[in-house]
């Protein structure tokens, strides 16, 4: 179990203001393209209008960080955002409108908890196999869905197919678990060679997601995530469990200070941080300090930007190795 997982596909940082988030991420040294948002008519024959969510991706060669913000149904789209027309036959339009609205409602509910990291998707080469495995283990999920997503390539922005599955807690709305939205995704073969940007901070990949839980909840979370991602890699420091196939670490509240000094999640359970690898940690540190970004050295090969400086999620910069 768990050998059908290749690490993290992406994490999702949900923000109140897309413009502010893009500015903050650029200050942190990430290359951030213009966001995209869906447009479609609310009724057959009506004008195409923006609503739902706007997002953009901080790309790496094998995964990405997603920034997500709600697009109000009566308000303007984010400045500089690219419209992505969604087209379906008239008889399927009501279902698509309902699905987009449901996604926006989920994002809004996450923001009511706190601004920060709420989405964690693992990468798999065999999504159908994952779906069958989860079903056999009694894990609720919404089945396999196919979407088109904008991808930056060497020939420009293209729409490429992807397939995904969301895990559902029976006591919550579809696609929800207590900590947010988790699931699996499988990319189709790229139609053009990927062209990930060169980030000024030297970041090269998304390498870890950290979930914080109340101390009494750790055994149940460890059991639940073991069903999703395979057995943990053995315990390291007390109060932690690492699921190496998915690059996910679960940390009890009392152990969080040892892992992320100074961090206190706004709610529990919550994704408290993610980590990115960098080519040269010393160069990354110089870049961030030149921009007056608050930093803590958490070890000889790690830097921590606190959640207070990164819109609700701590960011770890780790020397690749």
Image (tube, grey):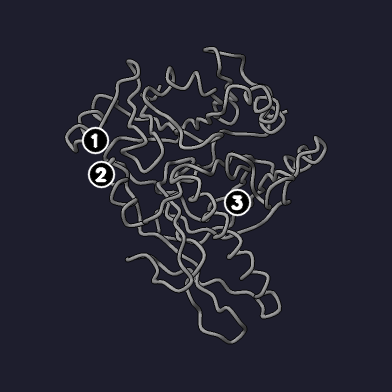
Q: Classify the position of the N terminus by image quarter.
A: top right
- Near-viewer residue (280 or 134): 134
Q: Residue furthest bottom?
A: 45
Which residue is at a point 47% across and 22% down the rendered structure image?
A: 256
Q: Is residue 43 above or below residue 301?
A: below
> Pointer 1: what residue?
293
Mark 2 vs 3: CB contact within 8 A = no
| Mark 3 nearby-residue class (10 Å; few <14, some 14–19, many ≥20) | few
- Near-viewer residue (138 or 244): 138
Mark 1 vs 2: CB contact within 8 A = yes
Q: Earlier in the sequence, mark 1 or mark 3?
A: 3
Q: Earlier in the sequence, mark 2 or mark 3?
A: 2
Which residue is at a point 58% across and 39% down the rendered structure image?
A: 179
Q: Is residue 83 above or below residue 43?
A: above
Distance between mark 1 and mark 3 Cα atoms: 37 Å
> Pointer 3: what residue?
188
Residue 141 located left or right of residue 280: right
Which residue is at a point 44% across and 33% down the rendered structure image?
A: 273
- Near-viewer residue (310 or 28): 310
Mark 1 vs 3: CB contact within 8 A = no
Q: Disc 2 on helix, strand or loop?
A: helix
Residue 255, image x, y percentages: 49, 18
Residue 123, image x, y percentages: 59, 40
> Pointer 2: what residue?
27
Q: Disc 1 on helix, strand or loop?
A: loop
Distance between mark 2 and mark 3 Cα atoms: 32 Å
Q: Disc 3 on helix, strand or loop?
A: loop
């Amino acid at each position: 179990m768990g050998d059908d997982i290749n690490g993290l596909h992406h994490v999702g940082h949900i923000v109140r203001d897309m413009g502010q988030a893009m500015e903050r991420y650029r200050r942190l040294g990430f290359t951030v393209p213009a966001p995209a948002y869906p447009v479609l008519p609310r009724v057959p024959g009506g004008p195409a209008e923006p609503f739902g969510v706007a997002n953009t991706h901080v790309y790496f060669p094998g995964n990405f960080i997603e920034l997500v913000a709600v697009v109000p149904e009566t308000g303007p789209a984010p400045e500089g955002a690219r419209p992505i027309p969604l087209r379906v036959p008239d008889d399927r339009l009501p279902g698509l409108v309902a699905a987009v609205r449901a996604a926006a409602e989920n994002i809004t509910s996450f923001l009511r908890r706190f601004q920060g990291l709420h989405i964690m998707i693992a990468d798999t080469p065999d999504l159908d196999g994952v779906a069958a495995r989860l079903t056999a283990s009694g894990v609720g999920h919404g089945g396999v869905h196919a979407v088109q997503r904008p991808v930056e390539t060497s020939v420009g922005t293209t729409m490429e197919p992807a397939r995904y599955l969301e895990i559902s807690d029976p006591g919550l709305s579809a696609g929800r678990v207590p900590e947010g939205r988790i699931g699996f995704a499988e990319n189709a073969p790229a139609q053009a060679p990927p062209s990930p940007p060169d980030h000024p901070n030297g970041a090269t990949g998304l390498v870890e997601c950290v979930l914080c839980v109340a101390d009494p909840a750790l055994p149940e979370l460890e059991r639940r995530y073991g069903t999703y991602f395979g057995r943990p890699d053995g315990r390291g420091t007390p109060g932690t469990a690492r699921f190496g196939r998915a690059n996910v670490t679960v940390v009890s509240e009392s152990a969080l200070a040892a892992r992320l000094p100074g961090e206190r999640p706004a709610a529990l359970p919550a994704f408290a941080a993610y980590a990115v690898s960098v080519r040269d940690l010393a160069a990354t540190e110089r870049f961030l300090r030149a921009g007056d970004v608050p930093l803590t050295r958490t070890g000889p090969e790690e830097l921590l930007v606190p959640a207070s400086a990164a819109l609700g999620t701590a960011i770890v910069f780790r020397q690749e190795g």
